[in-house]
Image (cartoon, rainbow, N blue to C red):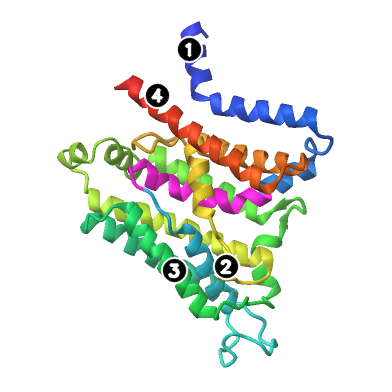
Amino acid sequence: MNTKSMKKVLGQNSIWLVLLAMCLALTLSTKTFLTAQNFMNILTTESIIGIIAVGVMWCILSKGIDLSPGSVVALTSCISASLAQQFVYAGRLFPNLPDLPVIVAVLAALAVGTLIGLINGALIAYTKIPAFIATLGTQLIARALAQLYTNAYPIPELKPEFKNIAQYNLFGVIPMVVVIFVIFAIVSGYMLTQTRFGSSIYAIGGNDQAARVAGINVEKNLIKVYTWCAFCAATGGILLAARSGAGNSSVGLNYELDAIAAATVGGTSHTGGVCRISGVIAGILILGVLKNGMMLLKISPYLQQVFKGMIIIAAVVFDMRKNAKKN
């Protein structure tokens, strides 16, 4: 491998070198970071954000944004939990509801999340409302619907088979929530690199007018993007309800910001047309390792937010400077 090829490889994978450096620094600074249990804790904690991030990255790739995933998580966690409460529990949200299979609760929540994504996509594609405004509106609506649905009370006493969706450990070691995250990352990566849909979104993010001239149906593809993003968020809501054992209208706060941060740190450009699934995964892990490391170092939660904000700003500035050089 010549010097030019080496520089190219290092440039494309610099985000992983940053992650490696962070892990090395925390290993030297703490006694408990470099343990299998701690790494599994990081993966388990960040998996739901990761699922949302591999949906949000498509919106950013298309030169848009989605601010509604956190509220979709809250609403779908409540819907799935309300349909998965134990039949013998006297305080069920719907006491007259028959004993339903767990699959009904899952499909109902996914359907609601998908519908919100369709609405987001249609608003952005056909009314030309800026994505920031359209998804801010659905964010507020979905959160309010979750609170109205539950009267702001938690929904406990869920069926064991529903909780196993997130609490079961594959081979007794790997949490199912991590397995599902890996599946979503693989599917999203395949769509990004191996399908016409993926190449169309790259083109739309790069220049939507040029994409139209090339025969790409921009509106139809944008609807698909926001539908996939909401589907990912709905999956996160189901997993969160299953993992915690309850649905709650207050969950999911700022999840969309963490997902956007992970995608941004991972190199997804807000100018559109630039995204790598490996970078997004690295971004998720970097924020997870950062959060975990600061907890182990007993850094104030308020300072943790300051550091996270600084990293996000630095990532965006770096992205803008890089794109300015290309232009």
| Image mark for residue 322 | 4
Three-letter code, disc 1: Ser
Q: CA distance from mark 3 to mark 1?
A: 48 Å
Observer-nearest of 27 and 221: 27
Near mark 1 (Cα within 10 A), the count class, few <14, some 14-19 or many ≥20, is few
Residue type pointed to by label 4: Lys
Secondary structure state at the residue bearing disc 1 = helix
**Farthest residue, direction bottom:** 96
| Dot 3 or dot 1, earlier in sequence | 1
**Mark whose residue sits in front, 1 or 4:** 4
| 295 sits to left or right of 213 | right
**Residue placed under numbered mark 3 in the picture:** 142
Give residue 113's position: percent from left, percent from top: 44, 65
Alpha carbon separation for disc pair 2 and 1: 49 Å
State if disc 4 and disc 1 touch (CB < 8 Å): no
Residue 5 has which mark? Answer: 1
Quarter of image, res 238 = bottom right
Q: Which mark is residue 250?
A: 2
Position of 155 compared to 234: left or right?
Answer: right
Tell me: 278 left or right of 211. Answer: right
